[in-house]
Amino acid sequence: MVKLIFKKLMLFYVALALVASPVEVLAAHKKISKRIVSSRYSGAQRVSVRYRSSRSLQMQRELTAENSYNGSGILRLASSKALVINQNTGEVIYAKNTNLPTPIASITKLMTAMVMLDAKQSLDEEITVSEGDVDYLKGSGSRLSVGSSLTRGDMLQVALMASENRAASAIASNYPGGKAVFVKAMNAKAQELGQNNTHFVDPTGLDSENVSTAEDLAKMVQAAYQYPEIRLATTSPSREVYVEGHEYPVNFNNTNGLVRGGEWEIGLSKTGFINEAGRCLVMQVTIAGEPTIVVLLDSYGKLTRIGDAKRVRKWMEYNSESKPTTTGQEISAVSGRIS
C-alpha cells in the first residue's frame, strides 16, 4: 500500500516537472529576448545620441571658428571653391579652386530668371504647376501642389527667394517651345556671358549635371544684378502669396539667413543645396564701402557658407584702409580682372 502511494506521488511529480519545464523555458526565452531588444534599443539610442552630439559639435566648431576670427590674419575659407572680387574693378580679393567645375544646385535659378525675363513674357499672366513640374529625381517637397496657379511674377519671386523648385520648373514649362527649348536658351545665355565651363540640363538645379565654376558664377551674378526684378526677389526677407487651395496667403521666406537678418547690405542673393553640390551661396554685397561679388561653393554643414561670408566681411573691414588685394587669397587660381 505504501509502495503504491509512493509510486503515484513520483508519477505526479514527474508529470508536474514535464508541464513546468516548457513554461520555465518560455519564461527564460522571454527574458533573454527582452534583454536583446533592450540592448538593441539602447544601441540605437547611443548611435542617435552620438550623431546628435557629433552634429552639435560640428556646429559649435563652425561658430567658434567664425567668432574667433577678427579679420587680422590670412583669410581662409572652408568652402571647397570660392571667389571674392570687387564688382567695380574686377580685382580678386580671394580665390580658391575657381576653375574646378562643380554642381551648383539652385544657383541655377539665377539663369532661369534671366532667360525668363529676356523673353519679355507677361509677369501678370497666370501659369499653373503641372505634374511635369514635380521633382521625381530628388523627391523634394513643395508648398505648390499640382494645379496651383500663380502669376509668372509670383512664380519668379518664390523660385528665387524661397528656391521653390516647382515654381522654377513651371516657368520653364510655360516658355515658348517648352522646357527643352528653355534649357537650350539657358546654355546659349551662358555662352553669351562667357561662362565657358558652365552647362545646364534643367531649370531648377536638382540635377547634378548642372555644373559651373566659381569664376563663371561670378560672371552670372554680375549679369543677374543688372535685372531689377532679380535684385528685388532675391533680397526680400519674405513674401505672402495667394496659392490656390489655401484659405489664407502662404508665407515664403528667403533661404539666406543673412537677408532675413537685415544687417547686411545685400543687392543680390541665391543659395543652393543638393548632396552632390554641398551648400552654396552667391551674393552681391557691399562690404567696407565696396560692391563685392561673393561665390561660395561646396560648403560642408549648414553654417559654413554663412561663416565664410562673415569671415570675408571681417577681413575686408579690417583691411579697408589699405584696400583688399589678392594677398588674402589661399590659392591663386585667378589673376587679373574678371569682366
Image: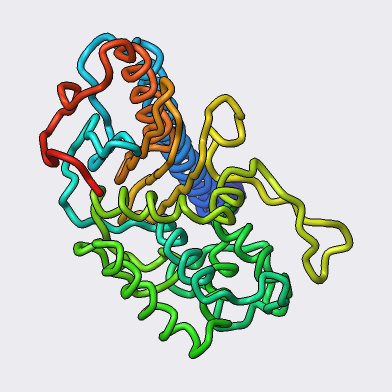
Residue situated furthest bottom in the rendering: 177
Q: Residue furthest front?
A: 89
149 with respect to 131 (left or right) = right
Measured as percent of width and height from the top left, residue 191 is found at 26, 69
**Foreground pick, 23 / 251:** 251
At 44% from the left edge and 55% from the top edge, which residue is drawn? 224
Q: Is residue 285 left or right of residue 132?
A: left
Q: Position of residue 213 (x, y in %)?
A: 23, 53
Q: Is residue 118 above or below residue 25?
A: below
Q: Is residue 271 left or right of residue 324?
A: right
Q: Position of residue 185 (x, y in %)?
A: 38, 78
Front-lying residue, 276 or 234: 234
- In this rendering, does residue 147 appear at all? yes
State the residue in front, 248 or 74.
74
Most extreme residue toward the right is 247
Decide: is 3 above or below 39.
below
Against 116, is 337 above or below? Answer: above
Res 132 quadrant in image: bottom right
**Viewer-proximal residue, 4 or 60?**
60
Q: Residue shown at 56%/53% (left/top)?
A: 228
Tell me how many marks there are.
0
Residue 4 in sight = no
In the rendered view, how is the structure colored? Answer: rainbow
Figure check: 112 above or below 254: below
Residue at 29 percent of width and 13 percent of height: 319
Residue 103 x/y as whole percent: 29, 58
Who's the residue at 19% across and 45% down the image? 98
